[in-house]
Amino acid sequence: ISLHRVVKNQSFTEEFEIYYQPIVNISSGEIIAAESLLRWQSPELGLVYPAEFIPLAESTGLIVPIDQWVVQSVCKQIRIWQNAGVSSLTLAVNLSVIEFNEPDCIQKIVGFLKNNNLEPQYLEVELTESMIMQDVNSAIATMNKLQSLGVRIAIDDFGTGYSSLIYLKNLPVNTLKIDRYFIHNVAQDPQKSAITKALIEMAHNLNMQVVAEGVETEAELSFLRQKNCDAMQGFLFSRPLPAAEFENFLWNNK
Ligand code: G
Ligand code: G
Ligand code: MN
Ligand code: NA
């Protein structure tokens, strides 16, 4: 398969591109972070989205070198933007549970931070709720190690997995990302409103920051503002953008 060829030839930079979607502080309007989202420009298939190739990469083990390339590239990008004068932007990377459970995962991340002379709080690792629950004790152990190094941890797609709230209390997590299912039409849907409001309060009581995903309308945003949600990500503010466009977007938002 051609995904295998990319990894074997180490031609990541030719075929892969990382897009960045801004994450905005709701009260200040400031871009505080961005989520990195991988795109594959395949010579045979054209533009392929992660929903199509990540499952394949996971089942073949190719996800390990791919995720490592993403973390390395994102660390380099943080350094580039810091050198350009962007001082307090955190970049988030999605990690597969397969990469997260690799024995050298943390060591690799530490190496990328060191090579780029980065303070660890500018990197955030996003893990999905269902991924953490696959082997919760081993996930907690690795998360604790990462957090003690100063790397931030986010739980992604929260509300769609099966995590018990008992576990949530024990998880070392900085950021809770509410899945876009709950945010879609949240202001008009009484059940979504009730759940989202409760999730925000719960996360704050556990000292977590809350990011609402998939914010598409002003009505959704004003609901979130009223419920003290910390930050938002979604098409209302911006789609995921190639690095150069994201950088322009940053300067235009100053
Ligand atoms: O950008 P898009 O909505 O197509 O992304 C879909 C999903 O693909 C994301 O929610 C994320 O979980 C996953 N994804 C995107 N980029 C990466 C990546 O670099 N590594 C891994 N493991 N997953 C990614
Ligand atoms: O990691 P995660 O599965 O949460 O990835 C976020 C995905 O959500 C990305 O693939 C991104 O393209 C998508 N996305 C981001 N903002 C919006 C939005 O406002 N609406 C919808 N429908 N999708 C979004
Ligand atoms: Mn994510
Ligand atoms: Na998500």
Image (cartoon, grey):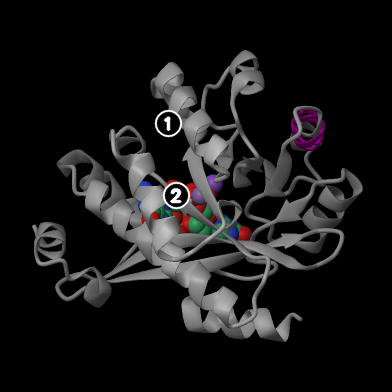
**Eyeballing the image, is 90 above or below 240?**
above
Q: Amino acid at mark 1?
A: Met
**Eyeballing the image, is 110 above or below 18?**
above
Q: CA distance from mark 2 to mark 1?
A: 11 Å
Taking the image as drawn, is residue 116 in sight?
Answer: yes
* N-term mark: 2 or 1: 2
Residue 3 appears left or right of 192: left
Picture residue at 60% right of the left edge, 42% below the top: 179
User: Residue 197 in the image: x percent, y percent?
Assistant: 82, 35
| Residue 94 badge | 2
Magenta stretch, residue numbers: 193-203
- Label 2: state its secondary structure: strand
Taking the image as drawn, is residue 241 in sight?
Answer: no
The prevailing secondary structure element of the residues shown in magenta is helix
Q: Does 176 appear in magenta?
A: no
- Label 1: state its secondary structure: helix
Residue 31 appears left or right of 76: right
Q: Is disc 1's CB within 8 Å of ligand 1?
A: no
> In this figure, which residue is indicated by the disc labeled 1?
131
> For the residue carrying disc 1, how many other residues have a C-alpha within 10 Å: few (<14), some (14-19), or many (20+)?
many
Q: Is disc 2's CB within 8 Å of ligand 1?
A: yes
Q: Quarter-wise, where is residue 58 in the image?
A: top left
